[in-house]
Image (cartoon, helix red, strand yellow):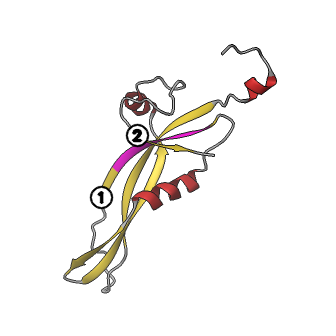
Amino acid sequence: QHYDGSTQEKDSVTHVKTLIWEATKIYDQNINQAGENIIDDEEKKEKFCFVTATKVSDKVDEKILQQIISSTHASATFNHNKNGAAITTERYDIQLAETNLAERLTGYTSGTIPPFGHIVPMLTLYMD
């Protein structure tokens, strides 16, 4: 279809900003019945990357995004040891992926990354 410059066709185009994020799983330890922290200070961490796609003029609310990622990926587990049971909960810290990581995962140069069609398939969240 040929674009003739009419307002209707021009307004139907949405420019998208694609961002690559890194989520790090953090385990928080609740204190057990004896008042002791049964997990050592070194937190067990796992990472995964995901994509957000928004209108160019929009901004991602990182707090809401972190809540979405944590609510869809986190869980709670029970640990038992000699001092009693404790609940370990998971949460995710998120941050923008470094440019070289984003480019390696997607196969595109920063500034030209589409929301899909990446070298490494990733969860894509379309934010509105």
Q: Main secondary structure of the magenta part?
A: strand
Callout 2: few (<14), some (14-19), or many (20+) C-alpha neighbours within 10 Å?
Answer: some
Can you say whether 27 is above or below 35 in the image? above
Residue interval drawn in magenta: 47-54
Contact, CB < 8 Å: mark 2 with mark 1?
no
Question: In the drawing, what numbered circle is on residue 22?
Answer: none
User: Residue 63's image quarter?
Assistant: bottom right
User: Residue 82's image quarter?
Assistant: bottom left
Looking at the image, the residue that sits furthest to the right is: 7
Residue at point 37%, 65% (across, down): 75
**Dot 2 or dot 1, earlier in sequence:** 1
Say which amino acid is labelled 1.
Lys
Q: Is residue 25 left or right of residue 7?
A: left
Say which amino acid is labelled 2.
Met
* Dot 1: element: loop
Residue holding disc 1 = 44
Residue at point 43%, 56% (across, down): 92
* Dot 2: element: loop
> Could you say which is closer to the camera, residue 106 or residue 91?
106
Q: Position of residue 6 (x, y in %)?
A: 80, 20
Q: Is residue 61 left or right of residue 31?
A: right
Residue at point 77%, 16% (across, down): 5
Can you say whether 91 is above or below 102 in the image? below
Residue holding disc 2 = 122
Residue at point 25%, 84% (across, down): 84
Callout 1: few (<14), some (14-19), or many (20+) C-alpha neighbours within 10 Å?
Answer: few
Q: Position of residue 123 (x, y in %)?
A: 43, 43
State yes or no: residue 17 in magenta: no
Q: Position of residue 83 (x, y in %)?
A: 23, 83
Q: Cα distance, mark 2 to mark 1? A: 22 Å
Can you say whether 36 is above or below 118 in the image? below
Looking at the image, the residue that sits furthest to the left is: 82
